Image (tube, helix red, strand yellow):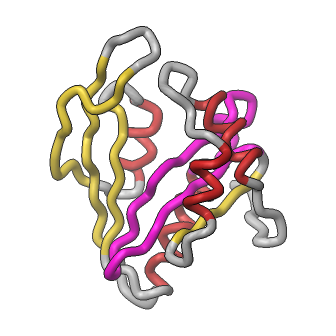
Amino acid sequence: MPILSGDYILSAHEMAGIHEQAFADERPWTSEEFENLISQSNTRSLSVARCFVLGRFVLGELEILTFACAPLDRRQGHASALLLKFLEMASKEGGHSAFLEVASDNLAAIALYNKFAFEQVGCRTDYYKRRDGTCCDALTLQKHLIIGQ
């Protein structure tokens, strides 16, 4: 697994570029949207190579807002390393659970979340709107964290 360093933080512009590459079928988030999110005091992000995870804490719950890896940086262990570190960070900050939404057809992401013991707790029908006009369900996943780990 790659070693994560807190020394390098992606800019909002860099995050937007990676997000656009990673989610080519969906509307990419803009630099302004990322800037708005990362400026909030309860938002956290981690990055390695051209991969990042962005989430926010609300009342002890970590919501993973987006998790993106540029296509050329996939299948190198970056996502596993980032998710592990992000969940550890959430637990150390007093988080008791983590949740996220993932497209039901994103099998690679679902496999990653299953590896980390996320469980499906819901489904949002036709949640993701694709650029070609089709829709895809969002699976809502949750994981309980060990507090103070």
Q: Is residue 105 toward the left or the right of residue 93 in the image? A: left
Q: Is residue 144 toward the left or the right of residue 66 in the image? A: left
Q: How many callouts does the rendering have? A: 0
At 63% across and 30% down in the image, what residue appears?
20
**Front-most of 16 and 87?**
16
Against 80, residue 123 (above or below) is: above
Residue pushed farthest right?
A: 7
Is 54 in the magenta? yes
Q: Is residue 19 toward the left or the right of residue 66 in the image? A: right
**Front-most of 136 and 97?**
136
User: Residue 138 placed where, x, y %?
Assistant: 28, 36
Against 30, residue 52 (above or below) is: below
User: Residue 127 placed where, x, y %?
Assistant: 27, 32
Is 80 in the magenta? no
User: Residue 40 placed where, x, y %?
Assistant: 55, 71
The picture quadrant where one finds residue 3 is: bottom right
The picture quadrant where one finds residue 98 is: bottom left
User: Residue 45 placed where, x, y %?
Assistant: 61, 64
**Residues shaded magenta:** 50-79
The picture quadrant where one finds residue 60 is: bottom left
At 65% across and 56% down in the image, what residue appears?
35
Looking at the rendered image, the quarter that the N terminus falls into is bottom right
Q: Is residue 41 toward the left or the right of residue 16 in the image? A: left
At 64% across and 52% down in the image, what residue appears?
52
Residue pushed farthest top?
A: 132
